[in-house]
């Protein structure tokens, strides 16, 4: 019984080597996915792509309207804050879209 186990191990190793010869190292590599990789194959390509764009947009740093440095980060939905000068303002949910009011207030401050 012990000898049969050795033959089985040898055969499985031989099979594994033949697969590596045929497909190269593709078996060991993992596909790199974006933040939408958690959805797998669900919800469709268009939905996953739009979700990816939204998530990348809200994680970016944007230019501050007051100090002109790229330090503006999203605090929560629609609230943006500059880490350098401390300006906190309301903008879009995923991008800090400034309205005419905030631009006028910033101009009046200067």
Image (cartoon, helix red, strand yellow):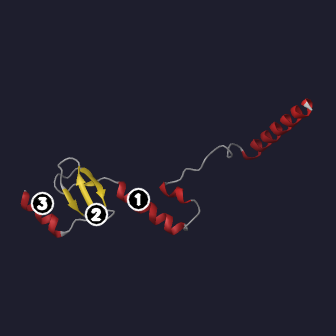
Residue at the farthest front position: 1
Q: Nearer the viewer, mark 3 or mark 2?
A: 2
Q: Secondary structure at mark 2?
A: loop
Relative to 10, 87 lies left or right? left
- Name which of mark 1 and mark 2 comes first in the sequence: 1
Q: On the image, numbered disc 3 is attached to which residue? A: 106
Toward the viewer: 13 or 77?
A: 77
Q: Is residue 55 above or below residue 99?
A: above
**Residue 18 point in image, percent of width and height:** 80, 42
Q: Quadrant of residue 97?
A: bottom left
Please tell me which residue is depicted at 29% across the width and 55% down the height of the picture. 75
* Eye-nearest disc, 1 or 2: 2
Label 3 to label 2: alpha-carbon separation: 18 Å
Q: Position of residue 87 (x, y in %)?
A: 18, 54
Sequence-earlier tag: 3 or 2: 2
Residue in the image at 31% along x and 52% along y: 61
What SS does tag 3 mark? helix
Query: Which secondary structure, mark 1?
Result: helix
Q: Which residue is mark 2?
A: 78
Measuring from the top left, give residue 71's x and y in whole percent. Answer: 25, 50
- Specify the quadrant that holds the C terminus: bottom left
Task: Name the disc covering residue 55, or none.
Answer: 1
Residue 53: percent from left, percent from top: 42, 62
Q: CA distance from mark 3 to mark 1?
A: 28 Å
Residue that appears at 20% across and 60% down: 89
Closer to us: 4 or 87: 4
Comparing 81 with 100, the one in front is 81
């Amino acid at each position: 019984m012990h000898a049969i186990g050795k033959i089985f191990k040898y055969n499985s190793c031989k099979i594994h080597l033949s697969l590596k010869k045929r497909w190269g190292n593709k078996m060991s590599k993992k596909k790199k996915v974006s933040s939408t990789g958690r959805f797998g194959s669900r919800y469709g390509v268009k939905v996953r792509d739009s979700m990816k764009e939204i998530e990348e947009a809200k994680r970016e740093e944007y230019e501050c309207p007051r100090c002109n440095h790229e330090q503006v980060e999203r605090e929560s939905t629609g609230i943006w804050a500059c880490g350098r000068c401390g300006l906190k303002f309301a903008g879009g949910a995923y991008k800090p879209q400034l309205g005419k009011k905030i631009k006028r207030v910033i101009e009046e401050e200067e």
